[in-house]
Image (cartoon, grey):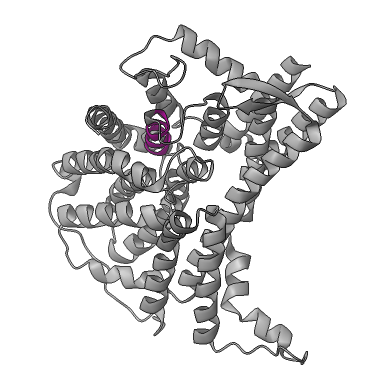
Amino acid sequence: MESLVIIVFVLGYLAITLEHNLKIDKLIPALGMMAIIWAMISLGHLPVFEVNTAELRLEPTHLDEILLHHLGKTAEILVFLIGAMTIVEIIDYFNGFSAIKGFVKTNSKVRLLWIFSILAFILSAIIDNLTATIVLITILRKIVREREDRLWFAGLIVIAANAGGAWSPIGDVTTTMLWIGKKVTTLNLIKFLFIPSLLCMVIPALIASRLPAFKGNIETIEDGDDEKIDKYSKIMLYLGLSAIVFVPVFKTITHLPPYVGMMLSLAVVAIFAEIYSNTRFSLTTVDSNSDEAAHYSPVHKALSGIELPSILFFLGILMAVAGLESLGTLFNFANEMNATVPMLGTEPLIAGYSVSDLVVMLMGVASAVIDNVPLVAASIGMFSDPVDSPLWHFIAYAAGTGGSMLIIGSAAGVVAMGMENINFFWYMKKIGWLALVGFLVGSAGFMFLRSFI
């Protein structure tokens, strides 16, 4: 029966990877295989286990207990993401991201390249790489007229956004998973990954700045009156970004799960959003205008704009991986791999076991082909290394930046592909090698820093 569970997972994983070919949203196979895996565990009366990280062994437990345990861990991530998405939507409600356009005051292609790369690197660390890509490509389309030029800029934005998301606990879903899963801490994640991630962004941009595509000036689009600037745009932009950045600080001070801090930040941002929108609610009576008020509430508008399909996909894939973890499959596979794969520079961390740098780098390359969320979810279930082990930092870097090698390898790449209709093979030929060089240089930088920090 356990073999059938693995087959169901592999088939579901394959369907997720081939979503563009099958023309089926990846949330469907994710939710399907999650439900089927847990049903097979229940109907087959398969034994389930919980990993004892202190003694590195599996301990038998009850199905209800382990299911509730994994659901709780998954819910922490989902609630956190819902809060972050809602804050970003509230900022967008007030057209807050329009203020970023003021940073772009040049026609030089090289200068624009560096401006967009730096903005992507910084913004993705705060509002996540997917949202940063959407914001910057939207701005790019308001500035650059020629589509061919925009394709090159969009490609470098994807690389920079994924690099920026890797060093921040709130910059990418995978780093958020590791952070909430208590595998990394904020300060150590930044300390170990900021420079490697910076190299992953700077090296491709430096090489690209010498390519013919970035020589000369661009033909800009003249500013028009088609974009309405809200008087509270900048206030809500800075308030929203500050609220998201506050979350790791809140966790450090209170030692509470990150979603608690995110809910506090959302509450603060929502209060100001309601005040600035002049929405009126009656707390004591229900009047005829209550529905109309709710309709124009920025909070209600923001909640209706969050990406619920992504939330459901994360629910499905994380709970499906949790099913394999509960069977002990991932733990046993990790032990076998650690026993057979030669060490390539990584010091033993627990009971003489470790993972070679080559395996982690291959995971990064694999994330360009298959979704990095289940890869990281599987690694969390496989390895029992302590918090802030170099293994977790390297996994965060590899999974976060490796997806840049293919346009379909990251959420940022997929959204850029949709917004600018980027051809898969064009990206692989023109941008993929730049992403690979940045990934390898950043990996070398991480290995070097690991020896001295």
**Residue 320: x and y, percent?**
68, 33
In the picture, measured across the screen, residue 20 lies left or right of residue 199, that is: right
* Residue at screen point 80% across, 21% down: 46
Q: Answer with the quarter of the image where residue 66 lies.
A: top right
Quadrant of the rendering where the C terminus is positioned: top left
Residue 227 in sight from this viewpoint: no
Q: Answer with the quarter of the image where residue 28 lies.
A: top right
* Residue at screen point 33% across, 50% down: 154
Taking depth in this image into account, of 419 and 275 the one nearest to the observer is 275
Above or below for 210 versus 354: below
* Residue at screen point 66% across, 32% down: 322
Taking depth in this image into account, of 323 and 432 the one nearest to the observer is 323
Q: Main secondary structure of the magenta part?
A: helix
In the picture, measured across the screen, residue 127 lies left or right of residue 384, that is: left
Quadrant of the rendering where the N terminus is positioned: top right
Above or below for 421 versus 444: below
Point out the residue furthest to the front here.
55
Residue 292 in sight from this viewpoint: yes
**Residue 350: x and y, percent?**
45, 20
Q: Answer with the quarter of the image where residue 131 lies.
A: bottom left
**Residue 287: x and y, percent?**
76, 92
Residue segment shown in magenta: 391-401
Taking depth in this image into account, of 86 and 151 the one nearest to the observer is 86
**Residue 105: x and y, percent?**
19, 68
Tell whether position 395 is magenta. yes
* Residue at screen point 24% across, 41% down: 195
Tell whether position 66 is magenta. no
Above or below for 292 versus 105: below
